Amino acid sequence: MSDEDVEAIPPSSFPVMLDETTKEYLFSTDEGTLSKASAETQVPTAHLDIGPEGLSFYNMDLYESQERLDIFTEELPSSRTEDEQFEAMEESNESRPRMEEEEYDLYTAEVSEMTRQYGIWDDKEDMEMGFQTQEPFVMVTQKQEPAVQNFKTWGEEPVKGEPKDRGAGEKRGSIHKTPAVDEGGSMETHQPCYPSEEDEPQSHEQHVGVRQYSEEAFEEEEWKEEVSQPMKASRGDTHIGESTGRWRDVFCMECRIAIRAFDKVFGTHKDHQVTKLSIAAEDTKVEIHKTMCKLEEQIAQMENFASHLEEIFITVEVAVPTVERTEEYTASDPDLKLSASLEFENDAIDFSDVRQMMDSINIVPAPSAPVINPQTPNSATSTSVRVCWSLFSDDTVEYYELYYNPVLEGTTAEENEEQDASMVKVKETYCTVLNLVPNTQYEFWVTALNTTGISPASERAVYMTVPSPPVIKKKVCRSCLSAALIRWESGNTNPVDTYTVELCEISRERSETAVTESIVGIPTYESIIQLLSGQSYLIYVRAVNIGGPSERSDSVIIYTTGTLFHLNEETAHSSLAISEDGFTFMFYGDEYTELNDITFSDNAFSRCVAIMGELIPIRGKHYWELEVEEQTEYRIGVAYEDTQRNGYLGANNTSWCMRHVTTPSRHKYEFLHNGSTPDIRITMHPKRIGVSLDYETGKLAFFNTELSQHIYTYKCHFLHYVHPCFALEKPGALTVHNGIEAPEYITFS
Amino acid sequence: MRFGIYLPPKAEGEKCPVLYWLSGLTCTEQNFITKAGSQQEAAEHGIIIVSPDTSPRGCNIEGEDESWDFGTGAGFYVNATEDLWKINYRMYSYITEELPHLISSNFPADSERMSISGHSMGGHGALICALKNPGKYKCVSAFAPICNPMQCPWGQKAFNGYLGSDKSKWESYDATVLVSTYSGPQLDILIDQGRDDQFLAAGQLLPDNLIAACTEKKIPLVFRLQQGYDHSYYFVCSFISNHVKHHAKYLNA
């Protein structure tokens, strides 16, 4: 062969008889050929395709495609063609040094282990894959002469004349692990799915590299055949010349049987390629080993491929509607400045190929049980929860089935299981389950499914919906200058854990929704909240359970400009009628009260036609006013919670009140406590009476507000908080005004 | 003429309002100072209290010392018109003009803010000064005042002696009558009366008449009949702080 041999090395070459007498054949693997080749250009330059970047493409098709070992049941169409181009490189494969210097990589070690187990391999560890993984393949070399072992890595300089194995070994490429399994090789990650432009070389490398194993097996044999002179096999010390010809120690490649060397020369196998039997055996072992490696690799690749595909599937599936929406949106001519083109090419992506591929992958095992996550805080609403779970990354899952059941109080676990569970099919690893009942616990479990089967169920996790918002009982809220008492109802049939009260200070600078303060962990249905005086507040309440806080309740507006309380209708004497706004009450007279209307409520006054306001449970000063007619006969003042309901206000030591009655001759004013009163005469009959209560100094004072006139002050010592109280002595009406600021003159009393 | 004056701590730095206290029959300027105990409350509110004498002394008018309820110590806060008395006994002018002028000239007194109060005859005096000078006194109160002198023995004796027998002249010094003709800024009268006051029982004080007149005329009046109290300074002392506070409300407003 000459240096300029541009002829393609014929696909099938015969071993050349070196010596008739010794019957030595020169096989392609023999050293002579190899070394010769090393000195010569083996590159069939006639078939050079100068590709990009000065890369040459060789016709690697040593064998016709049928003869190639078919590992893939279905091959990627694209890779096939490209492989062919690179197959030409095989020809220039010289030695196939698998010497000690080559390093094992983990993958090959595994395979070796396997082969050892299966007894294929004896001790020829050097036969094993000492291939480099680290460097990328050099399928396509720079077109200089490939000095023998010179298949350089991509871009590397040829190492001339070195009988080093590295080059070729690298060139052969290791069993290239799939990116998923790769130990950080410098091999760029590539998707074995759609070979993109960039991916081409590498993927080809990979495939070709893989393929090369099969090639190599053949190559060696081929070269053995080619060499006509006796050459030392690089592999060992097998000498062709030792063939005696007596035994069947020759292996016919074509017929795949052992034959006698004699037969080769003179028999039917004359035209067939032969090789020494031991060599053939070893080659076969190598082949099998390689095949196994390849298979392993392929399995890994396939799995990876499948999961990648699935990811893509899901992504695209999700993206398509987004694309559509965006398309719609852009089509609707928005007033936007976009940096990208508005025109969409919504190519219909043809999934059929991929789907075919997917369907073919049925070696996928059924998935293992998913792991359901505990409830994350603030992920629930009163009618929904967001359930999340995770899976093992190796699993292939088509979709999940999420089951759930409300946890009923008082049932055992078995009874719970017997209930019919609701189920939701979902593709993602999360689901927002709707239409649930507030403040209720639900048990969730999930199974994963793929075409193979269904996973075992995950553990059960309990999620809870947040409660419904509470309802503030506005009619029983009260406030004063420094604080407010808020009361509410739970809003849920089952108990919740705690309540949270939120305050928003209403001011011109702030928006109403800005919460200025939150009080958390309230265990009961009421709370006294300290506030600043002279402000307005919006107050909300939320119910809290392990699922999180509920929505806000309707708000109540609190003004800290004065003391505000409502009349407690439960305490009203049956003859009293209360207005709709709850602050005026009227007494129409006994004759209008039917006997059967009289309700003997424990809490109502029975004799004194009286009514109490709510308790004022906050220390400090309080002030309210009452409006009466000049002729109204009334009793107004304060009383303890437990004041006798069958008594008269002021007649006992649990109540204090100012009383006004008229006699034919004059107005009479009394300031009753414990049944006694000082003798006070007033010349002006107050129509609006201010009442000032000061818990600190123990004073209860009355004023004629129209005159700013102080009328009278009790000096008492209140042992408990008191309720404002009011009564009418004869038919008339009385209106309570509260939540108002106390006038200054009340301090001089 | 002698008078007593109490200056509160506040007067050291600024001008303070003045409460004029008119004492009753037989009193001098000393009674109030020693017996009433008003200083604490006055100090708290920063009020100057001036307590003048109840009549001129040592005038050498015939009969001036004959009785305790006429003449010396019983000036009745009128400007006498009868011959013997008309030169010296001009208590009304003294209280309403001369004394204030003297006080504001010599003491850190705010001449714009003054109020008046008194006991018994002094109560009568306070009432008539306030009623006859609408707007001059920011506030008026009284302890057991002689509300209707024209109708009681004390008053009749005094008016007869100082003003003569023409009752029409008496009217201008009778609080009950003055109320009915009063027109001026709104008053806020506070009257404390001991229930066990012997003079009340004797009909010398007649508060009901005043109350009726005030009711009629819609003049704000709070009248407190205090159980167990008599006419003495123990009674005054018991309720003086209420009154000072009452005055403070208007003097410091």
Image: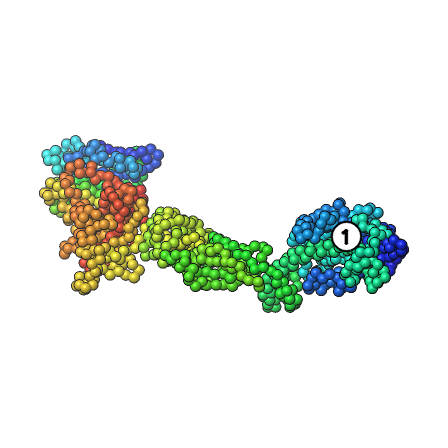
The reply, left or right, for residue A689 in relation to residue A41 is left
Whether residue A92 is visible, yes or no, is no
Q: Nearer the viewer, residue A101 or A408?
A: A101
Residue A20 spot, x, y in % from top left: 89, 56
State the quadrant of the C terminus of chain A: top left
Q: Chain of mark 1?
A: A
Along the line of sight, the residue nearer the viewer: A236 or A471: A236
Which type of secondary structure does the marked residue at label 1 adopt?
Answer: helix
The x, y position of residue B83, in whole percent, is 14, 39
Residue at screen point 83% across, 64% down: A268
The picture places residue A114, in percent across and down from the top left corner, at: 66, 52
The residue shown at (21%, 35%) is B36
Is A276 on the left or on the right of A388, as rendered? right
Q: Is residue A96 above or below residue B108?
A: below
Q: Quadrant of residue A620?
A: top left
Indicate how the structure is coloured in the image.
rainbow
The residue under label 1 is which amino acid type? Lys
Which residue is disc 1 drawn over?
A: A171
Asked whether residue B64 appears in the rendered view, the answer is yes
Residue A347: x and y in percent read 65, 67
